[in-house]
Amino acid sequence: MTGGAGAVVMLAAGCSGDTSGSGELASEESKTTVTITPANGTSKVKPDGTIEVKVADGTLQKVTVQGEGAQITGKLSADRTTWRSDRTMTPDTKYTVTAVAANDGKSQTATSSFSTLDPAQTLEIVDVTPNLKGEEVGVGAPIIVSFNRPVGNRAAVEKVLEVTPEKPVAGAWRWVDDKRVIYRTKTYWEPHQKIKFEADLAGLNVGGGVYGEEDEQATITVGAKQITKGDIGEHHMTVYRDGEKLRTIPFSAGNGTTREYTTTSGVHLLMGKENPVTMISPGRKPGDPGYYKTVVNHGVRFSNSGEYTHAMASTVGVQGSANVSHGCLNLSPKNAKWYYDIMQRGDVLELTGSDRDLEWGNGWGYWQLSFSEWKEGSALQ
């Protein structure tokens, strides 16, 4: 931290604690000395530095730190003679520290204003998913946090990411690349609750001269517990909400003639919906054998390899008895719209009966890993 010398303030009965200039105020009756670090007027203070207030021949009654950036908190020593900040500061920000000290029943106030360093590069959170306004998510929903640049010190960043559900459950972060980290619980979220996400990122030193830009927070609402269980070989799926059976839906799944035309088995999460959605044959160009381009309605995505539930009127005759699709679950127009209308991102779709397992990194296939395997991706292991 630059400006290592603190603002020294002599607090006298009946005098105000003016910390302008050198910060000294003295009289024959002075009994209390307050030292504030960083000193008044200091600039380019490192955001990960510590604010410290000390008092001699007296006790601290109150210390506050004001600034447009992160809300700075701190801890007071047991004897009330020292206060130290316990979190980092926002870069390129002016802060004012105000300390109230007392001696022989008389209180005085001291202040110190300083500014933090404006680093050449900062790290910030650019997206938290799922977090749409008014959105309710399913009980399997991950929390996906994306950054604006590669994260150098992943452990330091992970330590300041906090997830607080109203109904506690164990969970862990896993880094999937150098800009993205994902939170998954050990068991599904309890339904009908709110989850608070907080990241005290402002001023965090992540290495290479890069500091966190600002704090981030989000509130995620978990809706009903919607679980769909389907058997690809039996051509049906059953939808449950909060343990109650809602509907059994016949479908036609992938025909299995190739890997890409085989619907994946495993624990999927519903990722989003599109109406309409254009289906294009993977790896094929117009004129190639097997090329297709089809527009369908009420599509609900459940992987990144092109798997959806969607309406397909032309296969209604075999839905419930044969698998003829290119990997999606073909539903009747009525059932496809119903499923589309009730879906929540993060709802669970459990499929069995095919010889192709869902890859854990295919879409939101995170529940394909055991929780112990999931935790191996944490930087804090």
Image (cartoon, rainbow, N blue to C red):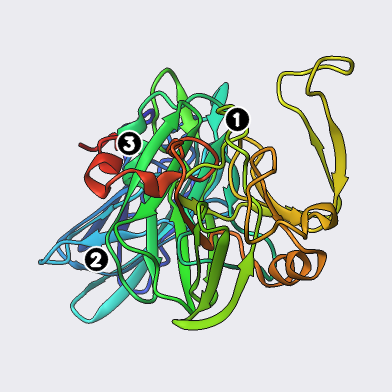
Residue type at mark 1: give it.
Answer: Thr
Q: Residue furthest left?
A: 79
Give the residue at x 47% y 43%.
Answer: 354
Binning the other alpha carbons within 10 Å of mark 3 as few (below 14), some (14 to 19) or many (20 upward) gives some
Residue 249 at x, y percent in the picture: 63, 69
The circle drawn on residue 257 is 1
Q: Position of residue 218 (x, y in %)?
A: 55, 60
Amino acid bearing label 2: Glu
In the rendered image of this protein, does residue 84 appear above or below residue 340?
above
* Residue shown at 49% from the left, 39% from the top: 41
Dot 2 or dot 3: first in sequence order is: 2
Q: Which residue is mark 3?
A: 156
Mark 3 vs mark 1: in front:
1
Q: N-terminal of the two: label 3 or label 1?
A: 3
Q: Can residue 126 be seen here?
A: yes
Q: Identity of the amino acid at label 3?
A: Ala
* Residue 286 or residue 47, whichever sits in front: 286
- In terms of image quadrants, where is residue 379? top left
Give the CA separation, mark 1 to mark 2.
94 Å
